[in-house]
């Protein structure tokens, strides 16, 4: 695979994975709009691994806390912050795993890759992001995440299986709707991404292991590295900006891109 193509795919995935603009939608649009070959499942897995590494590094303190709580969770000894956070993350991840497996096993995932659909979801969920950000209260502390809120955010996260929705966008929207401030909602959304990306990588990875070879492994390693750097930069910038800037710039981008995509999708041949 040409180095520039690898870099382009990894940069798009890395920059958009944690911004509320839909990484899957952008990756689907890349071959649709440019004529480039589809990057394939192995590169998809690689760039997801790269972004997973970035979010783990950025939220390392929280990740370490949750990981330390897993043994207690297994014993159902929920008596500290780590075991509680681990339990909340499990609850939040269950819906997307269930619905993701349904789409994967039924083949419906292949019917959700159209330019028109991405255009509509970009606009619709951009409006949802704007409404929840502007109208959502700020009454809750993200350090006291409840099981109910984790379940609700998990159900919203499952909507991100529709390309163009944005996993980070819909979970941040859910967090703002439930009463967390922008930074707190984004923190919870990013932590939720870790088991979700990991589960997605396991499912996709099982499909590509049989076709792996040395050249493909080299391409995958480069793609993972590029995606890691891009994701870490995007994540750092977004979390800092959320301290003082609303989510409106992302909404404007989503709606503008959605309109362009609908024009492309519905223009006469």
Image: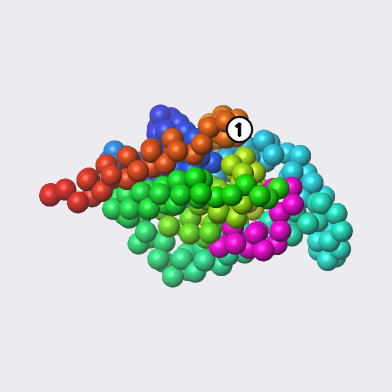
Residue 154 forms part of the magenta stretch: yes
Q: Which residue is mark 1?
A: 243
Q: Is residue 255 above or below residue 71?
A: above
Q: Which residues are magenta?
A: 142-155
Residue 59 forms part of the magenta stretch: no
Of residue 137 and residue 143, the one placed in the foreground of this image is: 137
Residue 248: horizontal and vertical position, in percent? 45, 38
Can residue 190 be seen at all in this image of the molecule?
no
- Which of the 4 image quarters holds residue 8? top left
Residue 157: horizontal and vertical position, in percent? 54, 57
For the point 35% across and 43% down, the residue is 255
Tag 1 secondary structure: loop
Of residue 7 and residue 1, the one placed in the foreground of this image is: 7
Of residue 76 and residue 131, the one placed in the foreground of this image is: 131
For the point 69% across and 39% down, the residue is 59
Main SS of residues in magenta: helix
Left of 258 or right of it: where is 44?
right
Residue 134: horizontal and vertical position, in percent? 49, 45
């Amino acid at each position: 695979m040409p180095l520039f193509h690898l870099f382009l795919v990894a940069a798009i995935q890395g920059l958009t994975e944690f911004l509320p603009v839909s990484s899957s939608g952008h990756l689907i649009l890349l071959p649709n709009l440019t004529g480039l070959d589809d990057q394939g499942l192995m590169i998809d897995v690689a760039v997801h691994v790269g972004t997973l590494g970035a979010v783990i590094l950025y939220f390392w303190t929280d990740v370490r806390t949750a990981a330390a709580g897993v043994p207690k969770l297994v014993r159902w000894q929920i008596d500290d912050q780590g075991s509680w956070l681990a339990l909340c993350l499990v609850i939040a991840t269950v819906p997307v795993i269930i619905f993701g497996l349904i789409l994967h096993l039924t083949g419906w995932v292949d019917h959700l890759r159209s330019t028109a659909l991405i255009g509509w979801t970009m606009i619709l969920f951009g409006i949802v992001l704007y409404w929840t950000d502007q109208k959502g209260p700020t009454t809750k502390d993200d350090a006291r995440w409840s099981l109910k809120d984790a379940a609700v955010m998990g159900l919203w996260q499952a909507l991100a299986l529709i390309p163009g929705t944005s996993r980070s966008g819909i979970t941040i929207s859910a967090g703002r709707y439930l009463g967390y401030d922008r930074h707190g909602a984004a923190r919870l959304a990013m932590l939720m991404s870790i088991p979700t990306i990991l589960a997605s990588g396991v499912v996709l990875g099982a499909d590509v292991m049989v076709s792996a070879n040395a050249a493909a492994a080299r391409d995958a390693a480069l793609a993972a590295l590029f995606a890691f750097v891009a994701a870490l930069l995007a994540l750092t910038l977004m979390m800092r900006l959320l301290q003082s800037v609303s989510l409106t710039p992302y909404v404007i981008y989503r709606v503008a891109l959605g309109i362009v995509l609908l024009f492309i999708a519905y223009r006469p041949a």
